[in-house]
Amino acid sequence: MSSAVPADDLPDDDRLPGQPTEGGATITPYRDGPLVVRGDFRLVDQDGAEIDPGRKTIALCRCGKSGIKPFCDGSHKRSGFSAPSTPSRPRPAAAILRQAQRPSD
């Protein structure tokens, strides 16, 4: 059974349930479903042109089957898409920042 959230059923607010808004966006990968983006964000295409999502909470397709890309239309349910809600090998944010800040030799 999928725990994915249908895009049309997402609340149109900028908070996760029970959490205060601190600015910025929160991106939540749903198991076997979309990436749900909540909060203050800007969505642009590969050329930098802004895409108006029309709401503060959106679901982005990650199965590749949506008819309204980059948004989720629930096609992952029919296609049998499978993906975890957590990364297979998480990297601590501090390690990523340290690596990015190292001077090149």
Image (spheres, grey):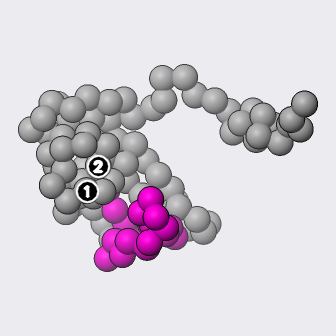
Residue in the picture at 25% in, 50% down: 5
Left or right of 75 on screen, residue 88:
right
Residue in the picture at 21% in, 32% down: 81
Mark 2 or 1: the one toward you: 1
Which is nearer the N-term, disc 2 or disc 1? 2
Task: Name the chief secondary structure element in magenta.
Answer: loop
Quick one: which residue is furthest to the top in this view? 89
Q: Looking at the image, is 98 positioned above or below residue 73?
A: above
Spot occupied by residue 1 in the image (x, y as percentages of width and height): 17, 31
Spot occupied by residue 52 in the image (x, y as percentages of width and height): 36, 75
Query: As rendered, which of 84 and 100 lies closer to the eye?
Result: 100
- Mark 2 lies on residue: 61
Query: As rendered, which of 14 and 33 lies closer to the eye?
Result: 33
- Mark 1 lies on residue: 69
Query: Can you see residue 94?
Result: no
Query: As rendered, which of 62 and 87 lies closer to the eye?
Result: 62
Left or right of 35 on screen, residue 69:
left
Label 2 packing within 10 angstroms: few (<14), some (14-19), many (20+):
many
Q: Which residues are magenta?
A: 39-59
CB atoms of marks 2 and 1 within 8 Å: yes
Q: Secondary structure at mark 1?
A: loop
Residue in the picture at 46% in, 64% down: 47
Q: Identity of the amino acid at label 2?
A: Cys
Q: Secondary structure at mark 2?
A: loop
Spot occupied by residue 78 in the image (x, y as percentages of width and height): 9, 38
Residue in the picture at 32% in, 30% down: 83
Q: Quadrant of residue 22?
A: bottom right
Question: For residue 24: magenta?
Answer: no
Q: Identity of the amino acid at label 1?
A: Lys
